[in-house]
Image (cartoon, rainbow, N blue to C red):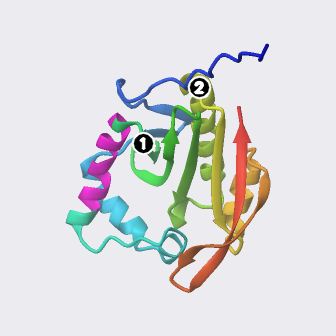
Amino acid sequence: MPLLVAPALPAGSFGGRKQPHLPVRPGLALRPWRTDDAPAVRAAFDCPAIQRWHVRRLDSDDEARAWTAQWAARWHAETDASWAIVDADDGPVGQVGLRGVLLTEATADVSYWVVPAARGRGIATRALETLSRWCFTRVGLHRLALEHSTSNAPSCRVAARAGFPVEGVRRESVRHADGWHDMHLHARLA
C-alpha cells in the first residue's frame, strides 16, 4: 500500500492585514513607503552604486511617486513588499523588501539598499535580520533567498552577516549596464 503524505500547508497570508511597522533598533525602523518619500527615493536612485546594482533610474518626481505608490498594491496581492528603512527623524535611509513571494511554497527573495550617507553602520544587516525574523515568525515563510553580483562585495558582507550563507554562483544570470554578471546566491532557512 502506498504511503500517503499530507499536503504541506501554505505559509500564512499578509495581504489582508495592514503592512506593519517593524522596529529594528532605537532610532531605526522599517515602515511602509509613502508618496511623500518620493524625493528621498529619487535622490537614492541618483546614487551610482544603487543604479549599478539595481539597474534602475528614476528620472522624474512622477516616476519616484509611482515607485513608492506601487508597493501598497503589491502588498495586497501578496507578490512583493517593500519597507523604507527610516532613521529617528522618520526619513528614509534605505529599502528592504520581498520579491517573488510564493506563499504556497513558503519562499521569497529579498532585496536591500542603503543611501551612501548611511552605509557602514550595519543598517542593511539589521534591517535584513528584522525582515527575516518577521517573515519566519509572523508569515510562516521557510526560505528567503537573495542574489547579488559577485562583484558587489559590500552586499555579500551584508548577506553573510545577516545569516544568509552563499549557496552557489549563477553564471551570467543578470545583465547590468556593463554586461552580464555572475551572481552569488545566498539563502536563509527558518
In the picture, measured across the screen, residue 49 lies left or right of residue 79, that is right
Q: How many numbered circles are shown?
A: 2
Q: Pick the quarter of the image with the N terminus.
A: top right
Q: Pick the quarter of the image with the C terminus.
A: top right
Choose between 135 and 173: the one closer to the eye.
173
- Label at residue 140: 2
Q: Quadrant of residue 74?
A: top left
Q: Secondary structure at mark 2?
A: loop
At 61% from the left and 45% from the top, the residue drawn is 128
User: Is residue 146 in the magenta section?
Assistant: no
Q: Quadrant of residue 108?
A: top right
The magenta stretch is 64-76
Magenta residues, dominant SS class: helix
At 35% from the left and 37% from the top, the residue drawn is 77
Q: Secondary structure at mark 1?
A: loop
- Label at residue 79: 1
158 up-or-down from 13: above or below: below
In the picture, measured across the screen, residue 104 lies left or right of residue 81, that is right
At 28% from the left and 62% from the top, the residue drawn is 64
x and y percentages locating residue 39 in the rendered image: 29, 61
Classify mark 1: residues with Cα within 10 Å, few (<14), some (14-19) or many (20+).
some
Amino acid on which the number 1 mark rests in the picture? Thr
Classify mark 2: residues with Cα within 10 Å, few (<14), some (14-19) or many (20+).
some
> Extreme left residue here?
62
x and y percentages locating residue 186 in the rendered image: 72, 53
Structural distance between the alpha carbons of marks 1 and 2: 15 Å
In the picture, measured across the screen, residue 171 lies left or right of residue 22, that is right
Amino acid on which the number 2 mark rests in the picture? Gly
